[in-house]
Amino acid sequence: MLIDGLIENTLKNTRLKRVRIKVDPSQLATYGYEHVTSFEGYILHENHETAQIYFLNLPDQFDSIQTVSKSHITPAVTDTINPSYDNLKKKILLQLEKEGIKSEAPGYQKILKSNNGEFLESYLKELGYTDDSKLKDFFKKITLGVSEATIEDIVNNPWFKALHKVTRGVTNIPKYVAGKGAILGKIGKFIRSLNPRDLIDVDRKYGVPKDSVKSGDAIYITNLPFKNLKTFKKGAFTYQLQGTATGSIFEDRRKINKIIDLEPVEVDRELDFALDFSPLGNKEKIGTLVMDFRALKEPTRYYKVKVQNFGKVKLITVLNRLNDAEGQIGNQIVQDEVRTTVKAALEEFFGENPTEDMGDLINSISNEILSSKGSKDAALQKLDNLLQKILSTPETEKPSNLKFLLLKGLKEIGLHK
């Protein structure tokens, strides 16, 4: 893609260190790349043990930004002359001449003698290109030699606002290149890059959705298929077990709330219970109760349950037992993958002017995506396309218009009521 090419050529013109990665961290061999022995890329960030790399020429289905062990990295052999920068420099000098800049001008000579783009912005400012709008217009005319029609496609793309800053040759890489948070146009790659830390972060920053099970909630369980369990009564409902919920944790590749301090205590000595429940996209409020035996060598049991919310009290009614395949599906994981993806999209969309009700907006959109009749991935892609479309319109020059345009667009694509 043109944008990928622009990013690659930009990175060549910075002081970022180019390296060869000896072992492919994405295990591309499983996808038919067994003949590939190494890749090359640029180090964006590093510590003592690992480095974050922007990979060059990865297949489209893989994330270009990956973290790898430094033991797998060796310096890449580079040419003393950078042909990409040399080509760009020729186009810049030619355009300067077209705009009346004489070749003997000091700024022109500095560009002519430069070997990289580190001070390119300063040189152009010496020649009268003193603000961002002038610089942007200048680069629109010379962007890596593509046709005028293609240039228009590029500059109208929402990525260009960030991209033109990189093309100036400075070493600060925009968030969408260096960070995992950017997803516009890259929904699939972003979802594949999620990890538990991302899923926890959405809770910490914006809180859990309404009706979620929270730490400290009182849990009452009824209708368990055990004849030796007594039935108790509290207020308007009966129950067999009571306990307290923990906050959400990750265990065995799923996100759950453990149920601790069970009563009767004899049950607490023998069994561990946990609840996997996601309120978004879940009109029937169905979840999975997970039961493990502490001493006996019995397999984990899974039960389909209905979760009724009474504020700080949750009543769990067992409906039926699930087989292992059904029980091992992580409901909260699916929910929070969507929430985390929507969060990243909206944070990028709003940029430095986030809306005050960001958490509610994230959960509202996520609920519609999870409730949609088609696949959640297709619904996420509709959202992504909408955000790109909005960012390419003139109205987005005013940050105050963003939320209005977003809500209007969400209604049109069926993701807001």
Image (spheres, helix red, strand yellow):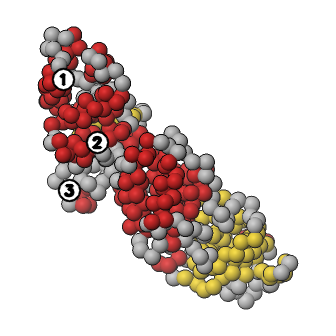
The quadrant where residue 71 appears: top left
Between residues 191 and 161, which one lies in front from this camera angle?
Answer: 161
Q: In the figure, is residue 14 to the left or right of 322?
A: left
- The residue tagged 1 is 99
Q: Is residue 200 visible?
A: no
Residue 214, placed above or below residue 107 = below
Q: Are marks 3 and 2 in contact (CB under 8 Å)?
A: no
Helix, strand or loop at label 1? It is loop
Q: Amino acid at mark 1?
A: Glu
Numbered disc in front, either 1 or 3 = 1
| Position in image of residue 51 (x %, y %) | 37, 38
Helix, strand or loop at label 2? It is helix
Numbered disc in front, either 3 or 2 = 2
Identify the residue at image location x=19%, y=45%: 150
In whole angstroms, how far apart are the C-alphas of marks 1 and 2?
Answer: 21 Å
Residue 168, placed above or below residue 233 = above
Q: Earlier in the sequence, mark 1 or mark 2?
A: 1
Q: Which labelled disc corresponds to residue 338?
A: none
For disc 1, the neighbor class at 10 Å (few under 14, some 14 to 19, many from 20) is few
| Position in image of residue 16 (x %, y %) | 30, 30
- The residue tagged 2 is 155
Q: In the figure, is residue 193 to the left or right of 5?
A: right
Identify the residue at image location x=24%, y=35%: 140
Identify the residue at image location x=30%, y=28%: 135
Q: Which labelled disc corresponds to residue 33?
A: 3
In whole angstroms, how far apart are the C-alphas of marks 1 and 3?
Answer: 48 Å
Between residues 101 and 76, which one lies in front from this camera angle?
Answer: 101
In whole angstroms, how far apart are the C-alphas of marks 3 and 2?
Answer: 34 Å
